[in-house]
Amino acid sequence: MAVISYREALNQAMREEMERDENVFIMGEEVGHYNGAYKVTQGLLQRFSERRVIDAPIAEMGFAGIGIGAAMVGLRPIIEFMTFNFSLVAIDQIVNNAAKIYQMSGGQYHIPIVFRGPGGPAVQVGSQHSQSLESYYAHVPGLKVVMPSTAADAKGLLKSAIRDDNPVVFIEGETLYNTTWEVPDVAPGSPSELIPIGKADVKRTGKDITLIAWSKMVWTCLDASKVLAEQGIECEVVDPRTLRPLDVETLATSVKKTGRCVIVEVGWPVAGFGAEVAYQMQKHCMDVLDAPIERVTSDDVPMPYAKNLELEVQPQVADVVAAVKRALYME
Amino acid sequence: MKYGRAVATASKRVEHDDHHEYVDTTPEELAPLYRQMLAIRRMEEASAKAYSQGKIGGFLHLIIGQEAVCVGATAALKPEDYVVATYREHGHAYAKGVGARPIMAELYGKKTGCVKGLGGSMHIFDKATNFLGGYGIVGGHVPIAAGAAFASKYRGDKRVALCFFGEGASTIGGFAEGLALAALWKIPVVLICENNQYSMGTPVYRSLAVEDVSLRAIGHGMARDRFDGDDVVKVKRRIAEAVDRARTTNEPTLVEVVTYRFRGHSMSDPGLYRTKEEVEEWKQRDPLGRCRQRLLDIGFPQADLDAMEADVKAEIEDAVKFAEDSPPADDYKSYVIKE
């Protein structure tokens, strides 16, 4: 097992898939000569040349659409958004074209494309650069939405996304790029190099309560679990990893075991993806729930800049601990 | 030649070529073009009738009056080339080789439609003829066409993509970004603005500061052309220049073809924003009628013309009957995610 960073894991995934398949190319702002705004594409230009690592000008709608057109006729583009905040100017392409062409064409054309880049709040970058937009994309039939929390998941899931015949919205945690995790030493070509899209992962086992979280909130929940363990409360942390399609079975299996559930997301509360998860859990686990399902989200405001306010808005370990105690009727 | 032969004008009136000047042609070249234009006209008329009978639903945007553009332009292509079109695309699909039967069945929402009743009038696709679809979001398909052409350049397979759109699309971002990237990356796409002078009910002088859309190419160093679209042979020749440029040099071209739609924007539009006189004036130079007369003038036998017209009538009647008799659409779940 090698311990590598989330950033390096993504880089390896793209590098290996580009070695494997000539039809895979990367297009986005600063992906080539600059080596990526977040250095995720570091070194790929040198290896694969300007033909396959394409620096795009600032035109997300344009290059997202070019990727879709190229995918229609058989290429497998990876479109990098410098951040998913900028995907909003390309959302027409993603929702109206990428997600619908397979249906609109009666199954004649499919769109094997990955839209990837960082999402979620970083550190003090203000309201327009600090959004969690997964609910927007998870709403749309025809898309898959993947949000890995660890380096191992990032690598295995990105490889699966690139090989998927459908459009995949792959949202990376902006604050996770430097985090490290054990990534199995698997030779490219081995079936175990892939992590299937649509499979949740239990990140920590526990008997008292289930915490459901994705992307950087997995880390917050793991930290909260340590605090709670010291108080004798054993949390099970389940990471869906993919929001669409959602692995309801694995999530519900955990909730049926513990009888309690807290859903933690860094997005906004209203129509956040956690609301859908809560619906699914109450529907599948109603008979065994010992308490109402709790949600922990960011506050319902545009993100403020000041560091203290920014932390206050987002779910912190203390917020998760408090929610767990509410669900356990300890407060 | 970096720049095409633009007619630069900021006037409030669209300039026209001399309508008595025809491009040289032969009966062998012109007859199949006329046949396609006539079939499209009859297909559109049949669909309008079916719409008024409640057999076709939703939006129905007819191309009557503009047939020379899609027929002439598509005639400049090879079968492996791509076409991307708008929601006013029945004619483009037919010209690319999609049959009247699957088109009409699609309008009827039948299982035998070219996209199995899932798309309707605005979303005709046909992989067999490289017809990459009709799109309902104005301008959003321009990058799609550039993407198909990008793939051609990436693989070196020398395919060209034609992208059709109206002058109303020239104000939206998808057009602007598609144009900019096609020029920057030298993508072998031909962007064809079918300027029918109204974006829905808004005339060009109320939607464009400069009415010559082809001028947008200049700022991108892109080749351009602009001409009127009444003579199908002229359309074919001029688009062929752009297609050849794309195929041999990967250089894109922005082409503006000035044309006119005789019907409203869609079936629900009575066209109150323009005068009867204006419409009548344009109907005087109906590209279909001009083409028919030209065909006779250059020696195509009347008897052959009569036979062709009867054949077209039968083809469209057969398509309507096929659509009427086809089973209803029955599957909306199989084509959401490819397994």
Image (cartoon, rainbow, N blue to C red):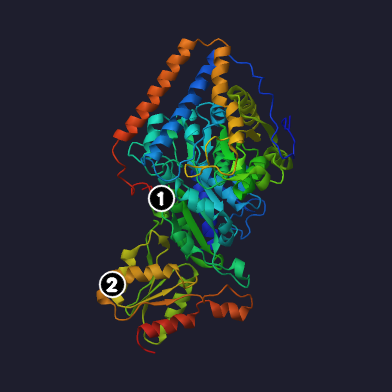
Q: Position of residue B80 (x, y in %)?
A: 50, 29
Which type of secondary structure does the marked residue at label 2 adopt? helix
Q: Position of residue B219 (x, y in %)?
A: 73, 43
Residue drawn at (71%, 31%), measured in percent from left and top?
A: B4
The answer to which of marks 1 and 2 sits earlier in the sequence is 1
Evaluate if marks 1 and 2 touch, with contact meaning CB atoms under 8 Å apart. Answer: no
- Amino acid type indicated by mark 1: Ser
Q: Which residue is mark 1?
A: A190
Q: Position of residue A254 (x, y in %)?
A: 32, 71
Residue drawn at (41%, 86%), measured in percent from left and top?
A: A230
Q: Nearer the viewer, residue A196 or B104?
A: B104
Provide the chain ID for the residue under circle 2. Answer: A
Which type of secondary structure does the marked residue at label 1 adopt? loop
- Residue B63 is left or right of residue B198, and the answer is left
- Residue B207 is left or right of residue B329, and the answer is right
Q: Position of residue A100 (x, y in %)?
A: 44, 48
- Residue B274 is left or right of residue A162, and the answer is right
Which quarter of the rendered picture does the N terminus of chain B lie within? top right
Q: Nearer the viewer, residue A98 or B314?
A: B314
Image quarter for residue B182?
top right
- Residue lying furthest bottom: A331
Q: Nearer the viewer, residue A193 or B187?
A: B187
- Residue lying furthest left: A287
- Amino acid type indicated by mark 2: Cys
> Counting other residues with Cα less than 10 Å from the Cα at mark 1, is it few (<14), some (14-19), or many (20 or more)?
few
